[in-house]
Structure formats: C-alpha cells, structure tokens
Amino acid sequence: MNDTLLDEYAKHLTLERGVSPNTSAAYLGDVRHFLKTLGERDALKVKQRDLEGYLWDLRAKLSAASLSRKIRALRSLPSGMRIMAARFVAEALI
C-alpha cells in the first residue's frame, strides 16, 4: 500500500499541484523517509503518536526550515494524516 501511496502522491504533486521538480523530489523524499520508519505498516492507518514521535525526533536533528518542509509534505497526504500533522504542529511546535 505504501508504494501505491507514493505513486499517487507523486502524480498529485505533479499534475494537480503543479509543484516544481525540486519540490516534488524533496516532498517525495520526506514522505518516503516517514514511510520507511513505519516499516510494513500501512501509512493510511498510522496513529497520531506515530507522527508525533517521528516529528519530535526530527525536531532535534533538523533546522526549522527542514522540519517545516517535512510537515508540509506530510500535510499534503490524505486527509487523516494532514489532520494529525496539523494537530501536532499546533500542540508541540508552537
């Protein structure tokens, strides 16, 4: 399922959002990195704590700009993950 999600996400970025090739590559890399941390679990069934833990760990390792880009990439995924990303940002990063 995660490979299908990445394929659909790549199409969405290019065809629907019209982002530049560099932005598309960066967002795909960010989402791919998150999916890698999930292992075999379905990305559409992640729990809020999965996303919170992932972003919290990155907070200490990345610049604010890089972390912000990762959040934007995750927010642009299916609605359930966007809601979780938005809630995490509102509660933990502000």
Image (cartoon, rainbow, N blue to C red):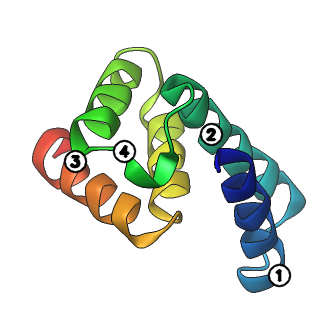
Residue found farthest to the right? 21
Mark 1 or 4 closer to N-term?
1
Instruction: Please tell me whether residue 40 is drawn above or below residue 10 in the rendered image.
Output: above
Amino acid residing under circle 3: Phe
Name the residue: 24% across, 50% down. Answer: 89
Could you say which disc has been placed on residue 46 in the image? Answer: 4
| Label located before the other in sequence (3 or 4) | 4
Q: Which residue is mark 1?
A: 15
Instruction: Say which of marks 1 and 4 sits in front.
Output: 4
Of the residues under marks 4 and 2, which one precedes in the sequence?
A: 2
Residue that carries the numbered disc 3 in the rendered image: 88
Alpha carbon separation for disc pair 1 and 2: 19 Å
Residue 25: x and y in percent read: 81, 48
Q: Amino acid at mark 1?
A: Leu
Comes first in the chain, label 3 or label 1: 1
In this view, 78 is above or below 51: below
